[in-house]
């Protein structure tokens, strides 16, 4: 059961015009190809755990409780390769001692974490779980890669899940999750792991420490996988496409969101769109969009909602819920 929601964005806003001063691009190209108008970017030295802590604190406030049994952090940009960032975030939130772990499914991370948290609750290992998705994605962007620089932004969203019954508003439906490792090269940060531990090659070349994406191919797979996962999720829940009041898809690109809605025969007015303000915030994009929609009234209690995402790995997923009444923190 979804019982609390919160989000946090770093204060610095970078507009398309500002990016056009640094890259060979334009506000027109970015708006028409992506739908993005601005994004928030961390200041130097602000780690992902800071964003996660801020969003987590707001979700706890929204839930009206600090009685939490476990903390999950979905992120592609942990503070360090080792250790995981979740224990640090749990400690900062006064939740030390509880199990806390990171989960990386890139842009599908929130849905993977939501499903994991729901399963932990169903197994009765926990009554309440704090699920945070946080990204300082700008720290991965190659300063010479204009196509990634214009797309990605930083931010964090968080929810509290609590034990409940499947027919209550806020109950998370059966999650449809998937992966295809044969597509691992579509979205990469090649260096810094065990395969290529050194970020800089002997000739001084360091591009491998940056994020790289084959945008067109990712676009194609993302539309197909998000549409398929959504169809499967709706079938599990017994909803037809016309029953869906809101579709909250990973905020990768406005054209992509419209293609998914079209494939599913869901009216584009039912799409929740948040990327214009924040860009693609990877794992954080769905909870950021949910929090904003809850606050703005685009999501109201009783709405039948489907969530779907696609990300590096490749990974994807979808799930449904009836939107509950949630306090804005
Ligand atoms: O988060 C995980 C899921 N991610 C996604 O689903 C991402 C999906 N993909 C996308 O959103 C898009 O592929 C991008 C926004 C990343 C790129 O847009 P695109 O329309 O696929 O562009 P492209 O990479 O195919 O490039 C088309 C043209 C190229 O020029 P030529 O070769 O046709 O002359 C690029 O050099 O656009 C050019 N281009 C740009 N021009 C101005 C690429 N980036 C830019 C830019 N400004 N920022």
Image (cartoon, helix red, strand yellow):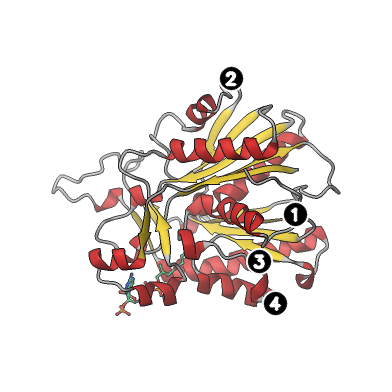
Mark 3 beta carbon near ligand 1 (under 8 Å): no
**Where in the figure is residue 229, as x and y percent of width and height?**
66, 62
Q: Nearer the viewer, mark 2 or mark 1?
A: 1
Residue at coordinates 66% horizontally, 40% vertically from top-left?
Answer: 62
Compare marks 3 and 1 and give the one earlier in the sequence.
Answer: 3
Compare marks 3 and 2 and give the one earlier in the sequence.
Answer: 2
Q: Nearer the viewer, residue 282 or 199?
A: 282
Which residue is label 3 attached to?
228
Q: Relative to 2, is 310 on the left or the right?
A: left
Compare marks 3 and 4 and give the one earlier in the sequence.
Answer: 3
Q: Secondary structure at mark 1?
A: loop
Give the Cα separation between the discs numbered 3 and 2. Answer: 40 Å
Give the Cα separation between the discs numbered 3 and 1. Answer: 22 Å
* Residue 20, quarter of the rendered image: bottom left
Mark 4 beta carbon near ligand 1 (under 8 Å): no
Give the Cα separation between the discs numbered 2 and 4. Answer: 47 Å
| Quadrant of the image containing the C terminus | top right
| Quadrant of the image containing the N terminus | top right
Give the Cα separation between the discs numbered 3 and 4. Answer: 12 Å
Q: Nearer the viewer, residue 124 or 60?
A: 60
The answer to whether one can see residue 185 in this image is no
Q: Nearer the viewer, mark 3 or mark 1?
A: 1
Which residue is label 2 attached to?
97
Q: Secondary structure at mark 4?
A: loop
Rendered position, 52 above or below 153: above
């Amino acid at each position: 059961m979804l019982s609390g929601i919160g989000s946090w964005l770093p204060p610095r806003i970078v507009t398309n015009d500002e990016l056009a001063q640094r890259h060979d691009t334009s506000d027109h190209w970015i708006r028409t190809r992506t739908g993005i108008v601005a994004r928030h970017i961390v200041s130097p030295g602000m780690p992902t755990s800071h964003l996660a802590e801020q969003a987590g604190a707001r979700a706890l406030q929204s839930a009206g409780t600090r009685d939490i049994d476990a903390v999950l952090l979905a992120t592609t940009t942990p503070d360090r390769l080792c250790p995981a960032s979740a224990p640090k975030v749990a400690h900062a939130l006064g939740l030390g001692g509880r199990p806390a772990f990171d989960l990386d499914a890139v842009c599908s991370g929130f849905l993977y974490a939501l499903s994991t948290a729901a399963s932990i609750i169903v197994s009765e290992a926990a009554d309440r779980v704090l699920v945070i998705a946080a990204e300082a994605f700008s720290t991965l962007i190659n300063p010479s890669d204009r196509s990634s620089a214009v797309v990605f932004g930083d931010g964090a969203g968080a929810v509290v899940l609590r034990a409940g019954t499947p027919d209550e508003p806020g109950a998370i439906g059966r999650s449809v999750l998937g992966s295809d490792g044969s597509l691992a090269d579509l979205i990469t940060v090649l260096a810094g792991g065990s395969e290529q531990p050194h970020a800089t090659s002997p000739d001084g070349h360091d591009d491998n420490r940056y994020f790289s994406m084959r945008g067109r191919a990712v676009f194609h797979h993302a539309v197909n996988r998000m549409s398929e996962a959504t169809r499967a999720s709706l079938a599990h829940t017994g909803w037809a496409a016309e029953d869906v009041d809101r579709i909250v898809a990973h905020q990768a690109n406005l054209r992509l969101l419209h293609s998914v809605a079209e494939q599913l025969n869901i009216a584009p007015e039912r799409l929740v769109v948040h990327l214009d303000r924040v860009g693609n915030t990877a794992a954080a994009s769905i909870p950021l969009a949910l929090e904003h929609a809850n606050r703005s009234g685009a999501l109201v209690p009783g709405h039948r909602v489907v969530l779907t995402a696609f990300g590096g790995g490749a990974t994807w997923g979808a799930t449904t819920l009836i939107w509950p009444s949630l306090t804005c923190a």
